[in-house]
Image (cartoon, rainbow, N blue to C red):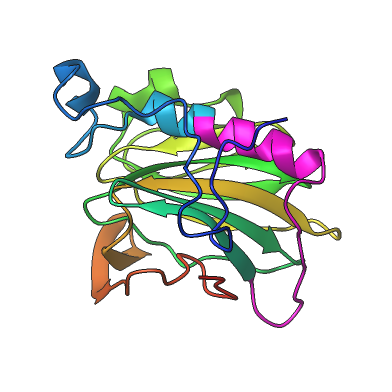
Amino acid sequence: MTSAVARSDARPDAPATLPFLPRTLHGDRRRWHDGPTPVSLSDLTAITRQVAAEVVAGMHEVRVDHTHRWSRRLHADPHLDVWLISWATEQAAELHDHGGSIGALTVVRGELTEWRWTSGRTEDHEVTPEELAASGPGLRRRTLGVSSGAAFPLGHVHDVSNRRPTPAVSVHAYSPPLSTMSYYDVDRGTLTRTRSELVERGASPEGGEVLR
């Protein structure tokens, strides 16, 4: 199988093989509809699914660290970062957004729980049956099993955690690469931003090991 990503530890002159990216930034203006990037949410979803299949095939090493969430960057260019992340039991990401980036994830192994903020019924057509029990603004829970995932449009606020007794593994893609993230609390049904942070170029979105 030809890898969908150029490994970060590959030769510097090794070409990236990302079939989902447009040949030029201006070849199809419709690709910009999801945000300030030529990569669409559907592109990111397709990329994470293909890389997830590569992980299953043993093409990318996975480690699990029970102290700190482990991650490895598999691809980086001016428009796209692709990350492989493992989640030991009870490891979680704080409630956050992705700044000016859009993103997607696909679960490779195990199960992840996502709590995402929604403004209310206007988004009911997008939620899963387990989310429909709630209405109005608030956090909605969905379970992401093997081969399933989620897309993150601009403004998507969520946390992700592994609540199962076995580790989980997921592939994440962001476009453009993350540069800022904001963090939130929910108090009495109100979403409040608590802080914003710059993301250093090449730094893991979830913390952990980075191979350059």
Quadrant in the rendering for residue 76: bottom left
Q: Position of residue 164 (x, y in %)?
A: 80, 56
Quadrant in the rendering for residue 153: top left
Q: Residue at x 33, y 60 (%)?
A: 188
Q: Position of residue 48 (x, y in %)?
A: 56, 37
Q: Position of residue 17 (x, y in %)?
A: 50, 35
Q: Is residue 89 left or right of residue 208?
A: right
Residue at the bottom extreme of this rendering? 67
Residue at the front extreme of this rendering? 13
Can the viewer see residue 145? Answer: no
Tell which of 121 and 99 is nearer to you.
Answer: 99
Q: Which residues, given as a range, are shown in magenta?
A: 47-69
Vertical side of 108 occupied by 167: above or below: below
Q: Position of residue 124 (x, y in %)?
A: 39, 23
Magenta segment: does it hold 166? no
Q: Is residue 90 left or right of residue 33?
A: right
Q: Residue at x 19, y 27 (%)?
A: 32
Q: Residue at x 60, y 47 (%)?
A: 171
Tell which of 136 and 90 is nearer to you.
Answer: 90
